[in-house]
């Protein structure tokens, strides 16, 4: 299955959260590919802590592949190459976790029939090798978004299931932006239909992930004053109303990731170690990630909204 | 190695084979296999049904003019053609295989193309071939701009995987493998032998062979295809068995109608349906090379491992025929 991770704005934690989902699925035994279509951003190397392995892929990344300069894009086996001590001690029974990086310094590039065919080749090859293929797309209505919309509408991928995750922060601006990315005139759904997707099917395969959400009920905020608490609750309520109006309400939310300093600042995978031994991450965050990872393939969360 | 046709005596042969599960829900029958493998309009696909269903495409040629990789940095330019072909076993496992042979010396200038074309699958060095260094260089894989037969095999695979016959609904997830080989002449009077067989990282296998004069490079490629096929089968079934989690622990939910199947049965069933009947070493290896298998059967013991794996698959399935209420009881010492 393909999972496309999109967001309208930067700073939604899209890359770090989708990398965490890939990591969780691999821990649970899936073979997972993480494909970095966030062209031009070096986040993935940091998230998976593979800086030196990345150096070897300078000219064999996804750009070079899509442009036809290399016939196979470089893949980095995370368990083997990570410099993160906890990750290196790969858990027993974990599946493979392979990062397909973009070229260092490669920006967006011209689209074309050949690039599309190569993208389809790549996705199909990954589909026959991996249980789950997470594709991280650059923010906004980017070339990467168009490319995968065209690739999943291609006759050769007709039998490959795909799902979209749209990440947004829990603010007025971000809710509206996320809704726009999906529903507006040149949003994902319309562009997909233009490329041959069935509107209802595509719509039904999109879910939202609310990131960096301060939960007023959480112990984190138990020390705040009554006034503050009441204010937070009323803001939260107003946002829910807005989200529902914008068609990004609870029925199409796959999960919520709490506000978590370690995701914001360190931009790395959250391991059990971070929660249990060093305790720099919150248990709730890890649980939220595990739950979203589980729901990715739980059909009961992907009925028609 | 052969004085094949009009070509000068070859002192080195080399190739690479890519092996993958055909990404289709159903195995292809012989007619569909012939359709898939029709890489050239002017030549027929060979399809045989005994002892198993097997299709072999005609050879295609790729012209090359580039440096050969070498372990000591020697710069050897070479010109000629690389032969490549595709094979499909039981309509299920697709292999693309590219190979060439190299004579000990060649002219130190480039000849007209016609002269290379009459010697398909021969790549001539400019001047003398530093055989040992090039053999090691080829096994290690070339750098950018050096001859890489793997790319030719890969290109053919990409082309075949675009065929409209394929629905891209593979019955199981599996990892493709690459097997790179070189063959050097055997010492006078010696028979063929495998000097080295290694499993490297990234699903790469390397094989170094010695073969007596007179063995065709297509036959060596055939032997290596057969090794690659069986190595891939072992690798794939081991991976399936590694993936079944025994005992408690919630597995990830599975989308679609297969979601309710017991996990172990869901994981092993495709092996039974699509892989277990494919084991048939030496089915198409030429007589003079067939006994090389005996060494591999002795150590590491390919068939021995295979039989153990098959038994494990069957035992697990037998165990899952027992109702869960009896099966899930933890045995007590």
Image: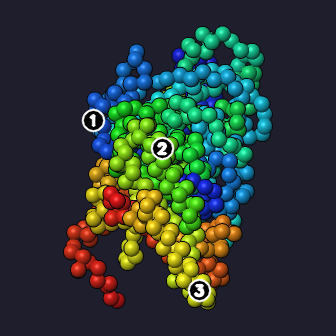
Q: Name the residue under label 2.
A: A185
The image position of residue A116, as x and y in percent, is 52, 35
Q: Nearer the viewer, mark 2 or mark 1?
A: 2
Q: Nearer the viewer, residue A9 or B12?
A: A9
For mark 3, what is the residue?
Answer: A227
**Image quadrant where residue B305 sits:** bottom left
Task: Please report, as a chain letter, where disc 1 is located.
Answer: B
| In contact (CB < 8 Å): disc 2 and disc 1 | no
Percent x, y for residue B104? 68, 25
Residue at horizontal 58%, vertical 44%? A142
Relative to A56, A219 lies left or right = left
Q: On the picture, is B152 further left or further right than A46? A: left
- Point out the tag, 2 or 3, that comes first from the N-terminus: 2
Relative vertical location of residue B109 with respect to residue A184 in this rendering, above or below? above
What residue is drawn where x is 62% and y is 34%? Answer: A110
Can residue A45 be spotted in the picture? yes
Residue A27 location (% of width, % of height): 50, 68
Local secondary structure at mark 2:
loop
Which subunit holds the residue at mark 2?
A
Mark 1 neighbour density, 10 Å: few (under 14) some (14–19) many (20 or more): some
């Amino acid at each position: 299955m393909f999972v496309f991770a999109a967001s309208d704005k930067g700073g939604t934690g899209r890359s770090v959260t989708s990398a965490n989902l890939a990591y969780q699925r691999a821990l649970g035994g899936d073979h997972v590919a993480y494909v970095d279509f966030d062209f031009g951003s070096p986040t993935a190397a940091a998230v998976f802590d593979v800086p030196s392995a990345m150096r070897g892929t300078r000219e064999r990344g996804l750009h070079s592949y899509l442009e036809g300069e290399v016939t196979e894009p470089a893949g980095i086996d995370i368990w083997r190459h990570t410099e993160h001590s906890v990750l290196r001690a790969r858990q027993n029974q974990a599946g493979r976790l392979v990062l397909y990086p973009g070229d260092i310094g490669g920006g967006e590039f011209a689209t074309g029939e050949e690039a599309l065919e190569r993208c389809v080749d790549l996705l199909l090859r990954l589909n026959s090798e991996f249980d789950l293929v997470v594709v991280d797309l650059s923010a906004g209505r980017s070339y990467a978004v168009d490319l995968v919309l065209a690739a999943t509408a291609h006759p050769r991928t007709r039998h490959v299931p795909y799902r979209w995750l749209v990440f947004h922060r829990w603010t007025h601006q971000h809710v509206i932006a996320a809704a726009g990315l999906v529903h507006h005139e040149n949003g994902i759904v319309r562009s997909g239909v233009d490329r041959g997707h069935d509107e209802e099917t595509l719509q039904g395969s999109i879910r939202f992930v609310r990131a960096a959400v301060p939960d007023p009920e959480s112990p984190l905020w138990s020390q705040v004053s009554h006034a503050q608490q009441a204010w937070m609750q009323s803001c939260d309520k107003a946002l829910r109303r807005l989200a529902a109006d914008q068609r990004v309400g609870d029925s199409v939310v796959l999960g919520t990731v709490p506000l978590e300093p370690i995701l914001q600042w360190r931009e790395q995978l959250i391991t059990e170690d971070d929660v249990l031994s060093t305790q720099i991450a919150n248990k709730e965050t890890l649980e939220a990630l595990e739950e979203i990872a589980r729901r990715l393939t739980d059909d009961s969360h992907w009925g028609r909204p | 190695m052969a004085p094949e046709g009009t070509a000068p005596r070859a002192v080195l042969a080399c190739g690479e084979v890519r092996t993958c599960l055909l990404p289709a829900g159903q195995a292809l029958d012989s007619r569909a296999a012939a359709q898939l493998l029709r890489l050239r309009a002017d030549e027929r696909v060979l399809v045989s049904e005994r002892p198993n269903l097997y299709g072999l495409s005609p050879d295609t040629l790729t012209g090359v003019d580039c440096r050969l990789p070498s372990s000591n940095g020697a710069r050897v330019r070479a010109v000629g053609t690389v032969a490549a072909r595709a094979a499909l076993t039981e309509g299920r496992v697709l292999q693309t295989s590219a190979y060439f042979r190299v004579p000990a010396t060649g002219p130190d200038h480039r000849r007209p193309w016609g002269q290379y074309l009459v010697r398909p699958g021969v790549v001539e060095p400019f001047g003398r071939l530093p055989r040992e260094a090039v053999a090691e260089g080829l096994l290690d894989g070339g750098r950018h701009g050096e001859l890489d037969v793997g790319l030719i095999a890969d290109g053919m695979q990409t082309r075949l995987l675009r065929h409209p016959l394929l629905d891209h609904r593979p019955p199981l997830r599996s990892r493709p493998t690459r097997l790179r080989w070189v063959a050097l002449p055997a010492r006078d009077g010696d028979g063929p032998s495998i000097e080295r067989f290694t499993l490297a990282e990234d699903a790469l296998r390397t094989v170094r062979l010695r073969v007596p004069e007179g063995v065709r490079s297509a036959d060596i490629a055939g032997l290596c295809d057969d090794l690659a096929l069986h190595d891939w089968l072992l690798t794939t079934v081991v991976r399936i068995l590694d993936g079944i989690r025994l005992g408690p622990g919630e597995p990830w939910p599975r989308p679609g109608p297969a979601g309710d199947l017991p996990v172990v049965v869901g994981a092993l069933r495709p092996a039974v349906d699509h892989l277990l009947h494919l084991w048939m070493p030496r089915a198409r290896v030429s007589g003079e090379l067939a006994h090389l298998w005996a060494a591999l059967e002795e150590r590491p013991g390919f068939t021995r491992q295979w039989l153990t794996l098959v038994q494990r698959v069957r035992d697990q399935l037998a165990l899952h025929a027992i109702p869960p209420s009896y099966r899930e009881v933890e045995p007590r010492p």
